[in-house]
Structures are given as C-alpha cells and as structure tokens.
Image (cartoon, grey):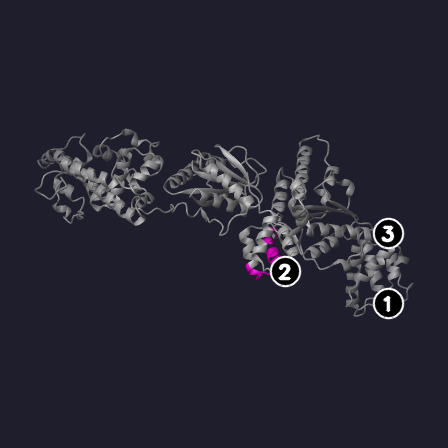
Amino acid sequence: MTTPLAPSEWESANARFLSASLSWIRLLLQRHLAEHAHQTAPQARNEDAGERPSVDAPRSWWRGSAARVADAGNTTRADGVPLDDVSFSGSPRGSGAVSDKEITAAAAEIAAAESVSPEPALVRLAQRLGLSRFERDTLLLCAAVELDPVAGALCARINGDAQRRCPTFGLALAVLPDPAWEVVSPHAGLRYWRLVELTRWAGDGVIGAGLAADERIVNYLKGLNHLDDRLTPLLTHLDPPSGTLPPSQWRVVETGAEHWRCEVAPVLQLAGPDPAAKRAIAACAAAECGLAAYQLPAAMLPQSAVDLDGLARLWDRESALLPLALYVDAEAVDETGPEPPSLGRFLSRLAGRCVLATRESWSDLGRPSVVLDAAAPTPAERARVWRESLLPTADPVAIDALAAQFAVEEAEIRAVAEMAGGRAEAAWPACRGRTRPRMDALAQRLEPRIDWDDIVLPDPVLRLLHQVADQVEHRTMVYEQWGFGARISRGLGVSVLFAGPSGTGKTMAAEVLAAQLKLDLYRIDLSAVVSKYIGETEKNLRRLFDAAEGGGCILFFDEADSLYGTRSQVKDAHDRYANIEINYLLQRMETYRGLAILATNLRSALDPAFLRRLRFIVEFPFPSPAERKTIWRKSFPAAAPTEDLDFERLAAMSVSGGMARNIAVNAAFLAAADGARIGMRHALAAARSEFEKLELPVRDRDFAVDEVGAP
C-alpha cells in the first residue's frame, strides 16, 4: 500500500503527473499534425500548379501549402524552439516524425507519476465522476489548450485556423488511444457533468464543434479545489457552533450522521419551528461525516426546468469534487399548500448529502427521506448553560426563569451572558431584545405602563390573574424539576381567555401581566391574520406562533371570537374550510409553549372544544358602583389639576373602566381649552359626548351642571 503524501508533497506529485500528461498530449498532436501534413502536401502541390482540390477534401486542405498552415501560429514551443522552426512533425526542422517509442515512453512516465496516494487530480476526478479512460484523455486534451500554449498552437494548425485553438471530438477520436464514439453523447460523462463546453461554428456538427474545458475543472486539475464561482452567490457556509450541542440535539446529529454514512444517503428532513436549531444540527451532522455544509434558500432556486437541472448537476459535480452537504432552507415556503414543484424536482435530482429544513415534514420528495425533529434545547439544558455562563452569584430562581422563558441556542445564551456581564438581571432584557425583531413585523407591540395598583377588578379576578403569572414564572420547577413535563406532551404553555364586556379591563390586565413577567406584549392584528383565501389564515397564524416560540413575548388576541368561533355544520365548501381553520387553531394553541391571552366580548360564541384546552378562563364583570368610584379616582392622575369632582355622582353613571378613562381624558382637554381646572362641568360634558358616541340613552338631568352648582 502506498503511503499517503503530505499536502505539499501531493502538490508536487500532481504537478509531475500533469506535466507528463501534457507532454504525452503534445506528442500525440505533433504526430497527428505530421501525418496530416503528409496527406496535405500533394494536394498543396496541385493547388500551386493551379489545380482545384477535391470537394471532398478536409477543410484544412484548402489552406494551401505548408507555409500557409504554419502562419496559423507564431508562438514558441514549451522547450523554447520557435514554432516557425517546427515542422509538421512537431520536431525541429530536419528531424524525423514523432515515433511510437516516444509516445510509449511518455505514457510510461504518466503511469509512474500516477502511482501516488492520494491519486492525482485528474485520476481522482475520473474515478468520482465515472469517466472512462478515453473520456479522461479527452478532458486532458481540452485542458491542455489552457495549460500548454504549444497544444493550442498545434490544434490551431490542425484546424487550419489561427482562431480555432481548441480541440474537437473529431480530433480526440483521431488522436487518442482506444477511441469510443459514445463520448459524444450528451449522456456521457464529459457533457453530462459539463466538464467541457461546446462551441459550434457555422456548418459544424457536434464532432466538429470546439471543446473548451470548464474553468473550474482546469483549476481542479492543477490542484486548486475551491467551490465553483457560479454557486457562491447562492450559498452560505454553515459553520458548526463553537461549543457542544446539548444532548437532545446531539442525538439528532448522531441519527442524521448514521443515515448519511449509508451508501445511498436519504434526504434528512429537519422539521420544527426553530431555524437556529436546525442549522446547528445540520452543520454538526455534516462535520461528523467530514463534510462542509452550505445553505441554499429555496427561494433562490430557478423556476426554469433547464436551469434547475443545470443547478442540480453542478451541485452534484461539486459534491464529487469536494466533501459537501447541502442545507435547503424551505422555512419561507408556503407549507399550507402543495410543495413547490421546483423544489421537489431539484431534490429528486440530487444524489449527494442533503438536508431539507421545513416547519413540517413533506410527504414525497422524489427520493428516500428521513424525518427528524429539531427543537431548541430543553429548559433543563438551557438552565445548565445559563449557570455556566453567568456569575456564580446569579440567583437560581432568575436562571430558571431565563431558561423557561427564552428558547434560545447555547451559543446565543453565552453571547447574551457575555454582553450582560454575567448578571442575570441584565440578561433578561437582552434576551427580550434578541427575540423582539421576530414579532415586530407580525403584530403590534404594546408598551405596558401600568401595574397591579392601577387596575380595579373584583378580588376573585385578581387572584386568577396572579395564578396566571405564577404559572408562567414557575414552569421550570414544576415541569422539569418536579417531573410533570415528562408525563405531559401537550399544553405545556399557558393559555388564558379574558371574557367580558368591552372596556372592563381585559387589555389592562394583559399589560399588568406583561409588566409583572417583564415580557413584551403583542396585540395581534386580526385584519392581517384572517384571510378569505384558503390556507392563508393558517399560514399567518403559523408565522405568529413560530415567531413567538422563542418565548420573549405574550400573544394577545383581541376579539378572538372572530378566530375561534364555534365550528358549524358542513353545508358547503366554505364551511368545510372554515372548520379546518378552527381545527388547526385548536391544535396549535394546545402545542404552544408560551403565554397566549385571548379576549372576547362573547364567550358563548367560542367553540366548546377550544374552551376545554384553555388553562384559565377569567371573567371580567361590569364594574359595580363601588368599583366605578375607585376607577374614577384612578382615572385622574395625581398631577392633573382637579376641582370639586363629585366621584359619588360620577360612580352613579353606568360606565365601564374604558369609558371612564376616555371621559377623564376628554374632560382634561375641555378644561385645558377653558384655561381652568378639571371640574364637574367638564366631566359631565365629556360623559355626555361619550354616551352619545356609543348611542347610549342620554337624559338631560343626568348631565345637568346646575344640580351640582355652576362654577
């Protein structure tokens, strides 16, 4: 067994092999040129004598005498002899033609240079792409024009045209040993793998077309093995994470690497909502198999079938020349409908190691596939990394809260901890900032500005709200440390329904929870979510839930009955698809791991099956007179200039908390316009306007200022 060479030694050995191969090609061309000149000489003499050459004569015979053919090139030979002084035999004038002995000796030199490990680049390429010896020699002939000026000049003389310095299939069949006609076929290796490019001149067929070796292949033969420039604009290199993956993700890596080590490797479908986890798993699986992973967005695939096939062949060729794995990112693909045909065709044509990253697995890819679930590290794994990354004095409760709330990767945890200086209290807002951009384009962020002291609700309602906050804060303890999570596969998040008339404090309660939990609150814009087109509503909701899976926010669905209405009896196609939407929403709510709050004015309109899946149902009653009095007092800030406000009389009006706040703000503007303090006449005037706006009964005596005295 040959001892493998070091990289520098292999480069020298490859150069020797290539030099010997080019010398052999040069000798073959010189001999062919000498034989060609011998056949042409009688014809040239006839032409000089005024005789017209035969119509059936080769094109080069029309070039006339040997002197005219010599004009086709005026460079020097590799050995320094001017080509003007080289006869058609390729040797200096006066010497004999190239002998079989010379060619045999050159072939023996090639064989000797080939006996190294690793094998020379040309030999390796032929083995990996399944080229025959004649195809390999034909490729060498085409590359010789790029690597050896003499070979190009000789081809130009043979072609009878100084501009046609490239060989043809006809020349390869005439010059090289063991010719095989199938090399011309578009299904043969040279043309199938685009190793050579054809240039057809007017009147030429495939046999007479010029052949040029692909630039990437020429560089490969010289020992320069870099990714093809035509692929670099489409691809992004995936580096494995700097640290080790958590055990839950490493098990997926080992499974994927095991499948890739099979002779016929399947496509690895990495399904799940966490793109970062899928990229890390794919990069590590590739590294385990000695491969470099590159990411290709599915949106970058060409739509033309011809271009798609060309891209697939180009990637497979690169996979044969380099240890590569392809990560096809289909996260942005609409998965609610059928799979895009371009992506399916592309995957079916690939033969190398490939990963398909999707939210949910696809049924048919045109080739064997294996579905693997990729998820973020578990809360326990995240807590371990937080403990390693934060200061030893960090509060264990704060660490558990970070681990439970933010589903981020290990590398991101370490980056946040470093940015926070190892302090848990600084890591929390940093995590919020990192997860916030995922949601800003999908929903409206509400900035909480109130706390428990600003909301007026009955004691039973307040107790339920505190229970909601407690369950969010202590999820890690209950699910992970106490083992309840091991027995529950669904419903690990907290889903809450706020039901009650408009203005009774549902939105305020959501803000209070967001302030208590130190999380961003996002109100879902239903006009952007609900769509009349089939499948669009599910697609929009999936984007929302996937973006929120990182845990840095609270989802607040206002007027949720428009989304979670009662399923109807199927009478037509519209009813059937409407029920499909509801079924999907019920399923997604049950699997969502964060805090989702749904608000409705009509609890009776909600589907009973949906109510069963909720963790809490909080009823917001219309405020009593005593509660309204407290609401009125809190509606006017301490800094507001008030005068003789009769809160007893204001509390007698049947208004909700939202109405009271609107009235207080409008009264303040009325007072500001008058240049006076906020008094009863401003409050009553604003109340009358609010009642008229809402088309509520208005009695003049209820808003008469004279009953309380004019200012």
Tell me if residue 82 comes above or below residue 49 in the rendering.
Answer: below
Crowding near the residue tagged with mark 1, few <14, some 14–19, many ≥20 C-alpha atoms within 10 Å: few
Q: Quadrant of residue 699?
A: bottom right
| Mark carried by residue 425 | 2
Q: CA distance from mark 2 to mark 3?
A: 52 Å
What residue span does the magenta drawing correspond to? Answer: 418-439
Secondary structure beneath dot 3 equals loop
The residue that disc 1 covers is 644
Secondary structure beneath dot 2 equals helix
Secondary structure beneath dot 1 equals loop
* Image position, residue 542 (x, y; %): 62, 43
**Three-letter amino acid code of the residue under disc 1:** Asp
272 vs 384, nearest the viewer: 384
Q: Quadrant of residue 650?
A: bottom right
Can you see residue 173? yes
Please indicate whether residue 622 sits to the left or right of residue 26 in the image: right
Q: Residue furthest right?
A: 707
Q: CA distance from mark 1 to mark 2?
A: 45 Å
Q: Earlier in the sequence, mark 1 or mark 3?
A: 1
**Three-letter amino acid code of the residue under disc 3:** Pro
The residue that disc 3 covers is 697
Can you see residue 197? no
Crowding near the residue tagged with mark 2, few <14, some 14–19, many ≥20 C-alpha atoms within 10 Å: some
**Three-letter amino acid code of the residue under disc 2:** Glu
* Image position, residue 470 (x, y; %): 72, 52
**Quarter occupied by the N terminus:** top left
